Image (spheres, grey):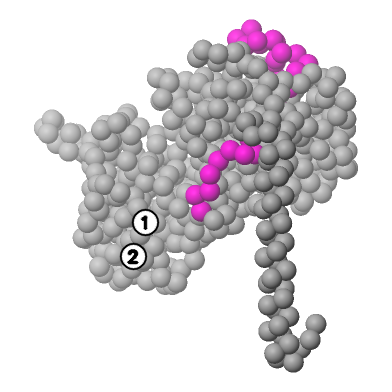
Amino acid sequence: MAVVEKDNFKDNLWKACDKLRNNMDPAEYKYVVLGLVFLKYISDRFESKYNELVEEGEGFEEERDEYTAENIFWVPKEARWAEIVKSAKTPEIGIKIDEAMYAIEKENKTLKDVLYKIYSNPLLDKGKLGELIDIVGGINLQAKTDKGQDVLGQVYEFFLGKFANSEGKNGGQFYTPESIVKTIVECLEPTKGRVYDPACGSGGMFVQSEKFIENHSGRIGDISVFGQESNGTTWKLCKMNLAIRGIEVDLGEEPADTFTKDQHKGKKMDYIMANPPFNIKDYWHESLDGDARWKYGTPPEGNANYAWLQHMAHHLSPNGTAGIVLANGSLSSNTSNEGEIRKNMIEDDLVDCVVALPDKLFLTTGIPACIWFLNRNKSNPKHRERNGEILFIDARKMGALVERSLRELSPEDIQKIADTYHMWRGSYKGEGEYEDIQGFCKSATLEEIKGHEYILTPGRYVGIEEAEDDGIPYEEKMADLSAKLAEQFAKSRHLEEEIRANLAKLGFDI
């Protein structure tokens, strides 16, 4: 059996899985690995309770109610991990796992049609599958770390991020980079009420919300989670991702398009967090004409950005807040009624804050992006009254490259953005008060925004960062720069003469 060291076990696990991947596309291999991790997880939880009941000696270890009463999935005997391991090195292992998945679904209604049954696929190398079972089985760690963190939950999250990176552009469809999700969660602080993501992917917004609540000594039971996802395989992934963490979620009856089949119609949400696909062009359907959601104007049929914004505004409760990631074009576009919709939203005092993000944060696209924060009630007595004001934050210089084409916001960056927002909003719990900082943040009035023709690009409002005074007199600095420039010109002329001479030797005079 593969040995997985406790230290760096996630990296070791990934390296081992990556080696086994062979020629299989990560988009397919992802489901093989994550399905096995899920099976191992629910089997481990079941086994732990099973052993506890055996020790009690009352003979209840095969009583389903003993498990369901504690929100533990009932795992039929043939689907338990120990049974899977027995067949790991046989040609029938794929069939065995698929049968286990069917059996678990049959016994647990909430998992109906959720688990992957792909292991008997003849194209899946059964020898490699057996090795993978050894590796996943090697995560022989207790359910919680010393810090009380769910280890297999961490493994799942780690794999989701790794697979998204490995898949490149397509991977980003189910995964929003963690630093972006954390920024939204730290600003909105979801602690009680309904949390909703209408383009939820693998459920990253919900996972970070849970972490936020835990870090602030709250109770996950104080929030109700609602989501929707149109991609069937991602919908299943989300269900499993959240089941591993014990997060109950209403993802609707089935995978479905949020615009044409809103599965949470009529529900008002306290927190909405979303990273919908940017600038999608083929979302429109004739049934959307005259839809009640288009309060601020009918969105263009060729770009869904303002349809997403209005869908989420429609679902906000009277004190609800939202954080939505969109392409920067949404801040300034005036084509196809977008400028008019933006103006109407601003005049209705719905826009609370706009954050310009640095480039290269996303796996899916290199185009610049921003976060819109919406607030249904800027007079909410919990915070400072700020009617007719919008906060602009220019975070484009934040973050650091973790790969050649991928940047991440650091915890300090995220905290600085969140603290600035909370100071301005009046919900900051530390010392210090909000003040405009040239080049970074600006609280603008409606009149100022009108003066910019309702364009919301933060750079227009925060201005250019003041250059730090290095103490060197202007004349001295110019003399130094001029000398360096003369030196570069001399080198350039010398190189040009050398090139001409070498070409002449070859018979090419220029």
Looking at the image, which is closer to me, 474 or 109? 474
Q: How many marks?
A: 2
Would you call the spot at circle 2 few (<14 residues within 10 Å), some (14-19), or many (20 or more)? many
In the image, residue 463 lies at what x, y percent?
Answer: 75, 30
Q: Main secondary structure of the magenta part?
A: loop
Residue 477 visible in the displayed image? yes
Name the residue located 17 percent from the left edge and 33 percent from the top edge.
Answer: 53
Tell me the magenta residue range.
374-403
Amino acid type, label 2: Leu
- Left or right of residue 332, residue 319 in this image: left
Q: Secondary structure at mark 2?
A: helix
The residue sitting at 76% across, 21% down in the picture is: 444
Query: Residue flagged by tag 1: what amino acid is it?
Result: Trp
Tell me, for residue 2, which label it has, or none: none
Relative to residue 18, is residue 180 drawn left or right?
Answer: right
User: Label 1: which residue?
Assistant: 14
Q: Which mark is residue 129?
A: 2
Q: Residues within 10 Å of mark 1 (few under 14, many from 20)?
A: some
**Would you say 450 lies left or right of 54 here?**
right
Instruction: Please identify the quarter of the rendering in which residue 288 is found.
Output: top right
- The x, y position of residue 372, in whole percent, is 69, 32
Residue 401 in magenta stretch = yes
- 269 relative to 25 in the view: left or right: right
Q: Position of residue 174 (x, y in %)?
A: 55, 49
Which residue is painted at 78% across and 32% down in the image?
Answer: 460
Local secondary structure at mark 1: helix
